[in-house]
Amino acid sequence: MSKKKIVFICETATLAHPSRSLTLAASLNPSQYEVVFYADTHYDALLSHISSVRHENITSTSPALFAKRLAKGEPLYNTETIKAYLVAEKAILEREKPDLVVGDFRITLQISARLQNVPYLNIADAHWSPHAQRRYRIPPLPIAKIIGYKAGDFMLNLFSPLLIGAHARPMNEVRKMYGLPSLGNRLEDVYTQADYVAYCEPPSLYPLPGLPQTHRYIGPVLWSPDMALPPWWGDIPRDKPVVYINLGSSGNKSFLPELCKALAVRDFCTLIVATATNEDMPELTEFTPYTARYLPSNEGAKIADIMICNGGTPSTMLGVMNSAYCIGVAANMDQLLNMDYIESAGLGRSFRADRQFIRDIVETCARQPVLPENKLAALRKEYETLCPKLRFPAFVENIVS
């Protein structure tokens, strides 16, 4: 029997998408599948090369441009970018002729896969599901700092069809060019439009009532860069609570020195910092000797009592599954939506990435919160039955068989 071909195409503007997609690609049995992985080269230095997977390049929006648009509250993709993505995807699908294409925030596949008659599986976050309950909170945009966050939240929810709908408009315009119906002004429909959808969270924390059979939970995809621990790792003292800071590739690092200083002055914790940037931040060594550009984040989460992250799904799932209380310092709406679920479950606290909240973040850490052991035990048990390295291949087999 010939192998089925599975092609992964990832958005690479942040590290979260290629890292989890490559983890899922590696879970497919090479005796059953020919697996091809398309991503941009932005994070190649951190991603392992999987011998059973053919690695290819495709252009994505640069991390800098992506972050700039997020910071301004602009649509992440304009019509010209969408059309350019479609040209590249069409060429890949025509050349590869896959039995299934898997996308991770490569939302243009909803058009290109349809045009090429290729089944499309979308790797998504549960908080963007059309079946999720959500309340919008305004990110730390310039306008929010003028009118205030309370007023910003009120306006955002009151006028969400207009304000959120603006982010769906470019995709709907291009869909119309190709004779496809509009998805309306609900951004969640744009982000999850596909033949099949896989959610990377546990259902106990992210309930989605009324899911169709084509939408399935595959569980948390836990990823960490394969790299050596720094020389100082064995010297980390454990006589105080360990606070591990890693704001990731999409976090707002502009106030990282100020946050570290505020924590160091209180002197109630041991501080470990991964700057998650290619630029040195020598000023941080004034507040802690335990700092590096990148760290194996699973090891940081394992020893952390408290993990300060960007509030996104990959970071919070890594923290929670390693028993760390998660403080999400959210810089965008995606992170705020995810943290609503974490906070509601009593597993962490959510703050916007704004200097005015540094004192509150420090006070939360000083209270030394811990996760409820009964909830942790239930999550671990759930993860045993919801392992993505088993659930994802089963989902793929169900689609292509």
Image (cartoon, grey):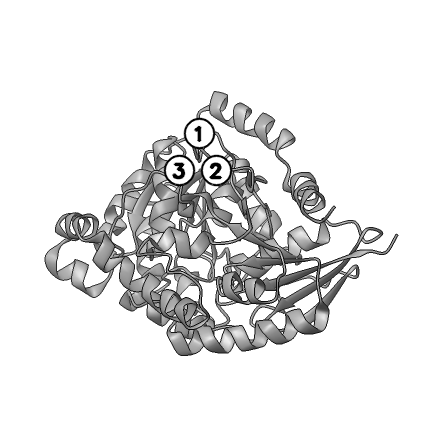
Looking at the image, tell me whether mark 1 or mark 2 is earlier in sequence order: 2
Left/right placement of residue 345 relative to residue 353 reads: right
Classed neighbour count for the residue bearing mark 2: other residues with Cα under 10 Å, few (<14), some (14–19), many (≥20): many
Mark found first going from the N terminus, 2 or 3: 2
Q: Which residue is drawn at 57% across and 76% down?
A: 88
312 left or right, relative to 24: left
Within the image, what quadrant is residue 295 found in? bottom right
The answer to whether residue 191 is visible is yes
Task: Give x and y (percent) for residue 9.
Answer: 60, 64
State yes or no: discs 1 and 2 in contact (Cβ < 8 Å).
Answer: yes
Q: Mark 2 points at which residue?
A: 324
CA separation in Å, label 2 and label 3: 12 Å
Q: Name the residue under label 3.
A: 342
Residue drawn 61% across and 34% down? 386
User: x and y percent of residue 286 in the render?
Assistant: 39, 61
Determine the secondary structure under disc 3.
helix
Which circle marks residue 141 in the picture?
Answer: none
Crowd around label 3: few <14 · some 14–19 · many ≥20 (10 Å): many
The location of residue 209, given as percent across then percent down, is 43, 32
Q: Nearer the viewer, residue 79 or 300?
A: 79
Q: Quadrant of residue 113?
A: bottom right
What amino acid does circle 3 point to?
Answer: Ile
Separation of disc 3 and disc 1 at Cα?
11 Å
Taking 49 as reference, is 319 above or below it? above
